[in-house]
Every structure is written in C-alpha cells, then in structure tokens.
Amino acid sequence: MINFVTRFAPSPTGYLHLGHAFSALTAYHAARAVGGRFLLRIEDIDEGRCRPEFEDAIYEDLEWLGLQWETPTRLQSTHFNDYAAALEQLREKNVVYRCFKTRKETADEIARAPHLPPDGPEGPQYFGAPLTPMEERSRLTRGDAYAWRLSIAAARDFLGPAFERLSFIEEGLGPNGEIGFVKAKPEIFGDPVIARKDLGTSYHLASVFDDAVQGITHVIRGQDLFYAAHLHRLLQTLLDLPEPIYRHHRLMKDKNGRRFSKRDQSITLRAQREAGVKPSDIRHSFDFR
Ligand code: GLU
C-alpha cells in the first residue's frame, strides 16, 4: 500500500476562510489522488487565543466543504506533556538555553549591536547565550519567567558536518521559486524560541513532533510557512524524527492582491455559506472537483 499521509493543521483562533479552504482541499485531494490518508490536527497550544467555538466551527466548515478525515482528531492542547518530553531531549543534548529576556530587552540588545542583523522569518535574527550557572540560579530562585531558545551554535557543534548537510525536498514551490532539493538554513531564524515563556512549547516544536507522531509523509501547507521547514529539518534531526517531503502551495489573494486574512470576515466559510455559496462553487473556483 502507498505510504502517503498528509494533514491540515489549523489553529482555532478565528473562523476558517477561503485561504484555509484552499489549503485543506489541496492536502485532501493530494491524498485522494494517490489513495493516501488525510488527517486533521487542531493546533491549539495558545490557549489565550484559541476558542472552543472556533474548533467546533472547523469541524462544521470542513464537513460542509465535503472533506472527510480520520478520527480521533489530534488536539495539541492535550499533548503538552509530549512537547515537554521533546524539549527534555533537546536539553539532554545541550542545544537549548533559558532566555529570561523580555521582547524589549532583546530588541534593545539587537539595536545596540554594531551591525544590525538581517530579518529572519520571525523578525530580526537574535543570537543569544545562556546565563552563567550562578546568574541562572539566582533568576530561577527569584521565580523569573524564561523561554527556551535553540542555540544554533550548539546545534552546529552537536551535529558537526551533518548540520551543513541539512536539506529538504520541496515538491511545491517556495516564495522565491524554491523547488526540488533545498539546502536548509535554520540559522535564518537566529536562535529561535522553541518553548515560549507562557506555553512551555512553540508552534515549531509541537508541529514537528506531531507530524512525526501522526506519521506525516507529506507536509502540505501554505507558502507562508516555507521558511519554517528550514528550522523544522534541524529540529527533526536533533530529535531523531523522520524527514517528510514538503509541498508548499501558493496563497490565495483577494481582489486587491492581498493575502486573505482572518480579519476579513466576508471570506469566512460561514459568511460564504450564509450568502448562498455552495461548497461545490468553492471547490470549482479552486479547480477541485
Ligand atoms: N497551524 C498553522 C496555521 O494555522 C499551520 C501549521 C502547519 O501546517 O504546519 O497557520
């Protein structure tokens, strides 16, 4: 039997819109075309931003669109322990460090640097360092909050030449026409936060872990996440997780050429449905039957 498993992984922070419909249909049809499997994952680690009513709406809207997925659906909010265990593995390898700095403190530090670092996918690249054990102990005793950052320098040391060989296969298209063999450059993120102060994990860690647990062979998602694959390949390698194939798809744009956004209520699937649009109209508008 063919081993093709893909997923749609929305965050329940708003109603699904036409951009999500395109993404979900792209993954669904890719699986159907080869007799593969299509899974759903609810990325709800950010409990401050996610709402149960948006989760319910995801199921309702995807069913309305005509999609079927395997159950049970994986809910990230029920797997915080797994992500903590993955973080522990990274700690054992000494490739992460505690960062007590506030956003403002890192921004000020970047501004003070002799050369302004380039922007990465998540803002200016920030390369930090752990505190001395004594400083760290005193901050911990004070109960100060900290995030965990992945140290690119430590990861490079840990992996040796394998760091330079990190790569992935892009079967879709990156925003700059990247296709086929892509050399992964995780350093474009600086030292990324992989466990947030408030959550104990991050999108990157949870997503990479779950793709492996769910046996995802093909990560199909929007081009806005193309650069995340550079970092995800490093995390997969450090955590001994399998390498999926990537297919990043183009992003749907509105009439003015802007990306569909959660703020635009008119393009939510609910608004479309209320306006009398049929699921088949949406599928056909994207060239899906
Ligand atoms: N949860 C992410 C989003 O809604 C998608 C993550 C992924 O597909 O890797 O944008």
Image: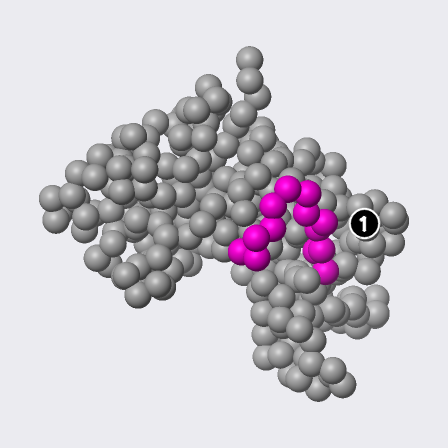
Q: How is the image coloured?
A: one colour
Disc 1 designates what residue? Answer: 163
Above or below 115: residue 194 = above
The residue lying at 87 percent from left, 48 percent from top is 161
Residue 85 located within the stretch drawn in magenta: no
Task: State which region is magenta.
Answer: 175-187
Q: Nearer the viewer, residue 221 or 199?
A: 221
* Residue 234, x across and y down, in percent: 72, 48
Instruction: Answer with the quarter of the image where residue 259 lies.
Output: bottom left
Q: Position of residue 67 (x, y in %)?
A: 32, 30
Query: Residue 198 is drawn in which quadrant?
Result: bottom right
Kind of residue sitting beneath label 1: Phe
Residue 129 in view, yes or no: yes
Residue 81: x percent and y percent? 59, 41
**Is 230 in front, or is 284?**
284
Residue 101 visible (yes or no):
no
What residue is at 83 percent from the left and 70 percent from the top? 132
What residue lies at 45% left-to-right and 42% top-to-bottom? 9
For residue 240, which quarter of the picture? top right
Instruction: Look at the image and tell me in which quarter the C terminus lies.
Output: top left
